Image (cartoon, helix red, strand yellow):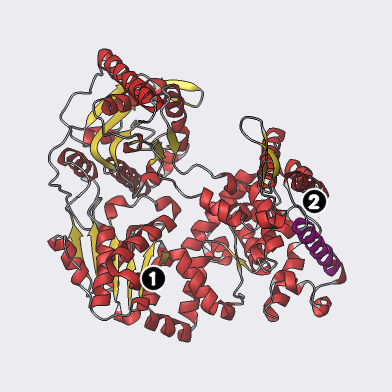
Amino acid sequence: MSHGLNLAQLDAVNHLAGPCLVLAGAGSGKTRVITHKIGRLIQAGLAADRIAAITFTNKAAAEMRERAGQLVGRDAKKVLICTFHALGVRLLRDAGEVLGLKKQFSILDTDDITSLLKDCGGTTDANTARGWQWTISAWKGAGMTADEALAQAKDEDERVAAMIMERYQERLVAYQSVDFDDLISLPLKLLRDFEDVRLRWQQKMGHVLVDEYQDTNATQYELLKLLVGGRARFTAVGDDDQSIYGWRGATLDNLKKLPQDFPELKVIKLEQNYRSTSAILRAANNVIGPNPKLFPKTLWSDLGEGEPVRVVDADNEEHEAERAVARIQSLRANSTHKEWRDFAILYRANHMARPFEQSLRRAQIPYKVSGGQSFFDKAEIRDLCAWMRLLVNNDDDPAFVRAATTPKRGIGHTTLQQLGAFATQYKTSLFEALFANSLGTAVPARGVASLHEFGRAVNELEYRARHTVGHEAARTFLSEWLKDIDYEKHLYDSEESEKVAAARWTNVLEFCDWVAGRCGGKLEDDAGVQVESERKSLLEVVQTIALISTLSEREKDENVVTLSTLHASKGLEWPHVMLVGVNEGLLPFKMDEQPGQSDAPAEDMAQRLQEERRLMYVGITRAQRTLAVSWLKRRKKGRESVPGTPSRFIKEMALDQATVKEDPREKLRALRAEFAKRATEQKSAQSPAP
């Protein structure tokens, strides 16, 4: 079970009796430790269904589930491996009724929340609503109520946000809905206020493992403490040097509190890195060195010295992009084994991707922008999918709330609040409740009429969709439906920019064409030839929408160059990394450029700089074999071009080497080699099979 683990990893895996903090440096095998510890706990006699492993992303949970399955077999399916938010859902489904939540409560996505906050604040501006959303999320993450937020408001903006938070919370209750922050704060309230629930879950949780512990916020830490109780059987795995999410509530205070709250805590450091060469790790250790240490550690590797880290200057953004592409071509041309997927270009902010996209397109190099928005994530597509989900499953309460209120049809939050309370009382879905004979005792006649009209519309649509077969019939149906609900007008009314509204309407038409096309019948293939495909009813197609949208959002292992922000790159790795735009004002980000920033407390400025330094450290440690760091002699600032200064982090890397001046002849040789390689590949692909 412990084959291939180093001594520090073995120590972490075999410590079962009490609380354990594993300080896992970048690339030190933390997932391996967690999965082996799951196996060791089962081997020691703990039932698999009493083990929980908590991560921060669904992708990380899926990877851990797969690796645990390879290690312990069938028992892995019994282990609760999930995100913090998925754990919160389980707690609320289990006992949320004591908080007034029915089991089929709705979980609102980001677009639902933005729409709700626009309504609460009386604005059509999505950016304003998103600003409130960030503020409210931060307050919830700190465990604050709307009243507490109002009492502590520092200025008029925060007072407004606190009042909107109160209205927003009222709407959530009315809709029998929760947001992502509630999936932590409400389970915390459950465990804190209801002893029977707390004792039952503490008995259920024989051992809790928490991945990426440095990313926990205040409420997540309190939730963990209540879950493990006095026995404190838990393993927290994290790295204070990779804490880069302070802006969304993560706090290193949680690492500081562990030894204080759990005096028996055993601290184990994982310092051997299995990812990067010594040259790369030396640069990483040097960069992170100036930060204060909670638990000092130094990464080391036995993978050899490797290529020196290169520092490259560039005249401007376009020149930097050209050099990055030339480097990719040069590295790839010098070996037959390098795939496009082996390369990544990392930057501080999303807007920095554009020149690299343009340069990659010119060179005909395939790429993807990591974290780009899925078509199915667009608000207008989610609106239509909500209607379609409701046709298939009338008990889908999140779909009901979205469809009933988008576009508006006289069903306000007060009516939904009354309907929600009625549905909770009789333990039914919202859709089923609106047809109850006694609904009039809970909802005024006008509200009942609006609800009945909506219910009849859904039933009629469901009937028509069931009997609509083939591409042309589906296309006609969808067109008539959009007119019936006046969706185009809704888009133009909800956007201040006609251009944005028109783009969203185009998305709607494309989506409807796509759905209709899946209904089959006579269609044109790519060559324009009429072909007959299997005919399906629109309802049959709609039943697959949720699955198709889920599949479309999965990251495919495509053979393409990755463009990514540093934040989105965390947890990933590539053989060859280019860290670009490493200038003062970009990384670290605007330390002395923001208006009024000079008035910020020195302690806040120091903490910001420390987090930016950790972000640089994360970027460096994504690289396995080679790392190039580039900076701009002149960079864009608004519409102007201003002199650029290399980031202080480049000096802190202590590379002891002059800035690399790329030889244009080397670039030309690389390009020629690349073209020759492509010509050979094309010739090979065109050759007839033997």
Which region is colored magenta? 448-466
Q: What residue sits 25% from the left and 69% below the top? A: 37
The residue to which callout 2 is attached is 485
Residue 390 picture quarter: bottom right
User: Image quadrant for the N terminus?
Assistant: bottom left
Q: Position of residue 378 (x, y in %)?
A: 61, 46
Question: Seen in the image, is 429 located left or right of residue 374?
Answer: right
Mark 1 vs mark 2: in front = 1
Residue 220 picture quarter: bottom left
Near-viewer residue (576 or 568): 576
Q: Amino acid at mark 1?
A: Lys
Near-viewer residue (329 or 504): 329
Q: Main secondary structure of the magenta part?
A: helix
Q: Position of residue 679 (x, y in %)?
A: 36, 20
Residue 342 visible in the displayed image: yes
Does the stretch in magenta take in 239? no
Dot 1 alpha-carbon crowd within 10 angstroms: few under 14, some 14 to 19, many 20 or more:
some
Residue 155 visible in the displayed image: no
Q: Give SS at disc 1.
A: helix
User: Eyeballing the image, is 458 above or below 91?
Assistant: above
Label 1 – label 2 distance at C-alpha: 45 Å
Dot 2 alpha-carbon crowd within 10 angstroms: few under 14, some 14 to 19, many 20 or more:
some
Q: What residue sits 55% from the left and 63% below the top? A: 151
Question: Seen in the image, is 28 located left or right of residue 484?
Answer: left
Q: Position of residue 531 (x, y in %)?
A: 67, 38
Q: Give SS at disc 2.
A: loop
